[in-house]
Image (tube, rainbow, N blue to C red):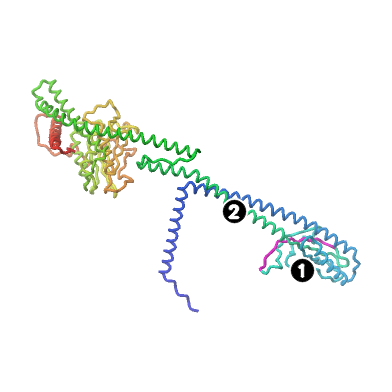
Amino acid sequence: MSAAPPRPRGAASGAGRRARLLRVRLGIRARRLTRAWRGSLQARVLTLTLAAGLTALVVLGGFLSVSVRDGLFTQRVDQVLDESARAAAQAQETFDASTATTAPEVQLLLNDMALALRSGGSGEREVFILRSRGQQQPILVTSATTDSELARTLVSDQLRTATARDEGQRWESVAWPASSSASGRLEPGIVVGQVVTVPAAGSYELYFLYSLQSEQERLEFLQGVLGIGAVALVVLLVTMTWLVTRQVVRPVSNAAHVAERIADGRLHERMAVRGEDEMARLGRSFNDMAESLQDQIVRMEHLSAMQRRFVSDVSHELRTPLTTVRMAGEMLYESREDFPPAVRRSAELLQQQLDRFEDLLGDLLEISRFDAGAAVLDAEARDVRDVVAAAIDQAVPLAARKGSWLSVVEPAERCVADVDPRRVERVLRNLLVNAIEHADGTDVRVTVGADDRAVAVTVRDHGVGMTRDEAAHVFDRFWRADPARARTTGGTGLGLAISLEDAHLHGGWLEAWGRPGRGASFRLTLPRRAGIVLDGSPLDLAPPEDDDPVVDPGEDAVGPSSLPDLPPTTGSFDVVARAREAQQAVARARQREEHAAGAAGEDPR
């Protein structure tokens, strides 16, 4: 015999792929059905109602079916036992009155008795008169049965043993092969046995075989009626549930649809209201609420537009008088050495407040651009480390005056991202100034990190810190954690608010963390490319619990160790005063450029 050829590997792998593809498709369809079921209140109500109704019908139908079956069976068994007892008593009386003494006479008596007992019941039955086992007969007489094959197959040894051992009736349920069916269908039946005494032959076992097919047919008819009623009831239940849920869910669905359209800006959308019931009252209440919201939103939009226009107009209109005052102030400031001390001090204060006033006007103009949606992102691929270095260079003089140490921790590889360098530098500059102001002479650490999707910069100080509630409001406009705290660097209260808008314009995050006495930490996270949706940051916002408040300067630290060596000098000079004068000279030059650009009709920003 030749061996079967091996199955090709390609066929096996193809079948495996088809099976996996089938499982994937089935899983997708199952998930779609689950989402559709979870997204439809009507489907959930119908499903739960159908499940509860089917469960109740199955339990109730099963209970009724079992109860009827047991009742029919018990009633029929009692009837069969009564008939069997009467028939056995009549047979015993006939045997006792018989005068048969020979074997042929006794055999004839048994045969006649079997035929007579077969037709004497309330229904179809078979009669078996079997000779008891293990007894010595004075004469030889065979058993008398109406159907020897049924007697051999349906009267079990256990029943014969129990019947021969104990006086009284013994019965057993059997499966009676239907003689009228060619398919071998079985009918329920019962065999009842009792011992009788035959003259001149000894003890014999008398068995009656009754059919329970009529009771079975009645039970099946009743179960069919119950099944039809159950199906009709389920259909009625599902139909009623669908109609009721439709009456309730449809207005709710319409309300949700109208609410979505209102949320999209279509404030004129309203629900269609019909009738006077609860759903109609809900629709009218919803329409009244939408009308009120529309009035409020329109009024707020009008007030907001007026506010933005007012801020923008005032900021622009103040530019011209500010330029005149600035020119006069600079003249007084440059001639301050010729003035008495009090006048000289007034000229210096005037110059400082003019700088602060000009910064405030610039911030107000920038905020008005964000509010009007006119802010534009001029993005380019830049190494964020260079932007951080430029911001730190501008913050070094302030850190020197405050006695704070600036340290930088950055990776060795480039951190290139599509950013607007001017806006990112402004954000970092605001964060550094804020950290130095509140560091109270402690160190400030700047950390740069990057991954495949984002770049991040954290600014950490170890100063007074802030509470959780203060961290939640730190980006609000004109908000200050401590109103009594002096502003020594001329802040406007809008720096962090503008920084948050700049971060959002890049599609990034700007977050704050702080604890009283442990300092604060700000984290700027920006996507590397436009369109990337951030789901995490390369750096942690909150420092670890065992964070050391003392920061050791690294190789990139900006501090005394990183300054170039100076030639030996003699005498003394005011480093802080000269640094302040240099910074003010740079600020004045920048202001002159902005004034010239404003006079030429250009935007200085």
Q: Which residue occupies the foreground of this view, 241 or 287? A: 287
Prevailing secondary structure class for the magenta stretch in the rendered image: strand
Q: CA distance from mark 1 to mark 2?
A: 44 Å
Q: Is residue 226 magenta?
A: no
Instruction: Please identify the quarter of the rendering in which residue 429 is found.
Output: top left
| As drawn, 592 above or below 212 | above
Element type at marker 1?
loop
Give the labeled residue for mark 1.
147
> Residue 70: in sight, yes or no?
yes
Q: Is residue 127 left or right of residue 384?
A: right
Q: Is residue 306 left or right of residue 269?
A: left
Q: Which percent across, then down, holds residue 323? A: 14, 30
Q: Which residue occupies the foreground of this view, 279 or 354? A: 279
Q: Which percent across, then down, holds residue 287? A: 42, 37
Magenta residue span: 183-196
Q: Which percent across, then down, holds residue 104? A: 87, 72
Mark nearest the camera among 1 and 2 is 2
Q: Is residue 190 magenta?
A: yes
Q: Which mark is residue 231?
A: 2
Q: What kind of residue is marked 2?
A: Val
| As drawn, 270 above or below 141 | above
